[in-house]
Amino acid sequence: MFNSNESEFLKFSNVTKIFKSGHLKTYALDSVSFSLMENEILSVVGESGSGKSTLGLIAIAMETYNSGNVYFEGREIKKLKRKELRKFREKSQMIFQDPYESLNPFNSIYTSVSTPLYGFHSKMPYDEKRKSVIKILNDVGLMPATEYIDEFPTKLSGGQRQRASIARSFILNPKFIVADEPTSMLDASSVAEILTLLKKMKEQYKYSMLYISHDIASAHYISDRMVVMNLGRIIESGSSDEIVNHPAHPYTKKLIDSVPKLGEKLDNIENVNFIPKYINGGMKGCTYSNICPIARDKCKTERPELFDLGNNHYVACFYPLI
């Protein structure tokens, strides 16, 4: 399973995730299908409520799903035996959004970063564990590592804490990383540093990654391909350059147009967020049809499926912009 030569590394096939509250149903994912290739960074872009974080949790088996299939290197995750699932968890790690919450303030950097080693390689001698932590701290730019390894998170800046979190995610040399909004809590200079670090780590560790973000600019910078989500559905996918330079869905264009330009006042930027509830069966038409400037009657009653515009650029829209 874990030595597959197939290029299709992770695959979602018509995955639906429903959250229930009494008799009400909320569709977090609504028949989502996509593939992540080996040694690729795929960004998942969308606003709050689009389903991207739920997608990330399902991808690393931290959340269940109602229907469809999720495959990792050709094997369905739901059908993994206990030993196989443990191996999958060892090779699949997550970088969380908030470095102030993801590191226990009462644990030293050594304790936090080495925790996966104690979980999966408990028999490794302490000296080897410490050497591994020192190496990974140096790799993520906390240098010299000896000055950081015994410190506590309160002594570190936000960017340094996120580097420590990244070190913890890479200590087991994973093959698959889910990065859930890893820069959203950082200042602008730290954002650039973390994105550059993740690209450098990709060359060094040869991993595949789902990069989850509401920020289409950072997603464009770091990823090879991109999928855009709106209310539980993928509404556009393709190369990051193609989508940003030639958006075909009105929602994608709105996301791009809403990125602040240098010198622009934030209060002049329209809010594109619109999150109605999927009640008892999901939406019949396009998820964006309620506020789409070009929507027609068909958009409100029929669900558009992804189709190829050419150049492996897919869009779920009856009236694409290109």
Image: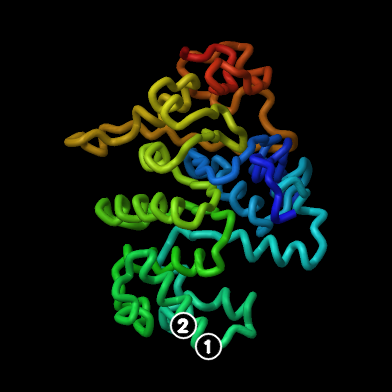
Task: Pick whichever, 311 or 280, lies toward us.
Answer: 311
Residue identified by numbered label 1: 126
x and y percentages locating residue 278 in the rendered image: 65, 37
Residue found 45% across the figure and 56% down from its top: 204
Q: Is residue 78 left or right of residue 31?
A: right
Residue 26 in sight from this viewpoint: no
x and y percentages locating residue 29 in the rendered image: 66, 41
SS state under label 1: helix
Residue identified by numbered label 2: 130
Q: Quadrant of residue 280?
A: top right
User: Is 137 drawn above or below residue 32 in the view shown?
Assistant: below
Distance of label 1 from label 2 (alpha carbons): 6 Å
Q: Is residue 73 left or right of residue 201?
A: right
What's the amino acid at mark 1?
Answer: Tyr
Task: Pick whichever, 264 or 222, lies toward us.
Answer: 222
x and y percentages locating residue 128 in the rendered image: 51, 83
Crowding around mark 2 (Cα neighbors within 10 Å: few <14, some 14 to 19, many 20+) is some
Crowding around mark 1 (Cα neighbors within 10 Å: few <14, some 14 to 19, many 20+) is few
Residue 109 in sight from this viewpoint: yes
